[in-house]
Image (cartoon, grey):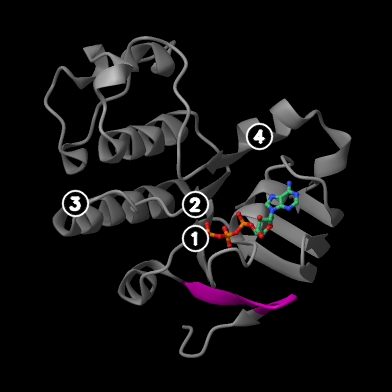
Amino acid sequence: MSTLTLEQVSVGALRDVSLAVQGGEILCLSGPSGSGKSRLLRAIADLDPHQGQVRLDDMEQGTVPGHRWRQRVMMVPADSQWWFEQVGEHFQPTLPQVPDALGFPADVLAWPVVRLSSGERQRLALLRALARKPAVLLLDEPTANLDEEMVERVEAWLKAEIRRRNIIVFWVAHDSAQILRVADRHYRLVGHQLEVAHGSH
Ligand SMILES: Nc1ncnc2c1ncn2[C@@H]1O[C@H](COP(=O)(O)OP(=O)(O)OP(=O)(O)O)[C@@H](O)[C@H]1O
């Protein structure tokens, strides 16, 4: 089972974050808007300059090219990017099974990207990331654009996939009910620190 280790990571206002997360574990991050949650995810993905070390098992972030690191340590930003015309083109070479939990009709992979709503983009971005078999998933508010029923469906699907594949997960969330449902650990960004959230389990 893989382990992601952060040693004294500092980015923006956040100082000296040291922790380790195991495969299959979901670490939720919450905190006020602008406190640095996305920046921490971007640092872990090697997308933002930072201090300190990030290691996936024996692979040091600084010793591999960024694109190779991100094949293993994959960020799903709140606003996903799509560069081909059709949805299915983003899933080459192998088209995935689209799980019922995502609520799409069978022909979704043939849809043009321009027709996607923000919630559809978000659900498909999660499917796209999982299809690439990452060791680590960095999820930035992965259900922010979904209605209440879809939030719980997507959450349950994601959680099952994370457990089944032993993926290491950082999950930025604002909703305390969601955090209770999905988190194995919960940290809050407070000033310069990452603090264990009260009631964390
Ligand atoms: N590359 C950068 N250089 C300097 N400042 C930055 C950079 N990227 C983000 N910031 C600033 O760092 C702070 C934290 O931003 P971040 O996007 O991590 O917040 P957040 O906690 O994810 O907020 P939200 O909940 O609103 O998404 C913000 O004040 C933002 O303007």
Circle 1 SS class? strand
Circles 3 and 4, Cβ within 8 Å, touching? The answer is no
**Residue corresponding to mark 4:** 70
Left or right position of 118 against 199:
left
Measured as percent of width and height from the top left, residue 57 is found at: 74, 50
Which comes before the other along the chain, label 4 or label 1? 4
Front position among marks 2 and 4: 2
Residue 172 numbered mark, or none: 1
Circles 1 and 2, Cβ within 8 Å, touching? The answer is yes
Callout 4, which amino acid?
A: Arg
* Most common secondary structure along the magenta stretch: strand
Callout 2, which amino acid?
A: Asp
Residue 150 numbered mark, or none: 3
Cα distance in 3D space between marks 1 and 2? 5 Å
Residues drawn in magenta:
184-194
Front position among marks 4 and 1: 1
Cα distance in 3D space between marks 1 and 3? 18 Å
Measured as percent of width and height from the top left, residue 139 is found at: 49, 50
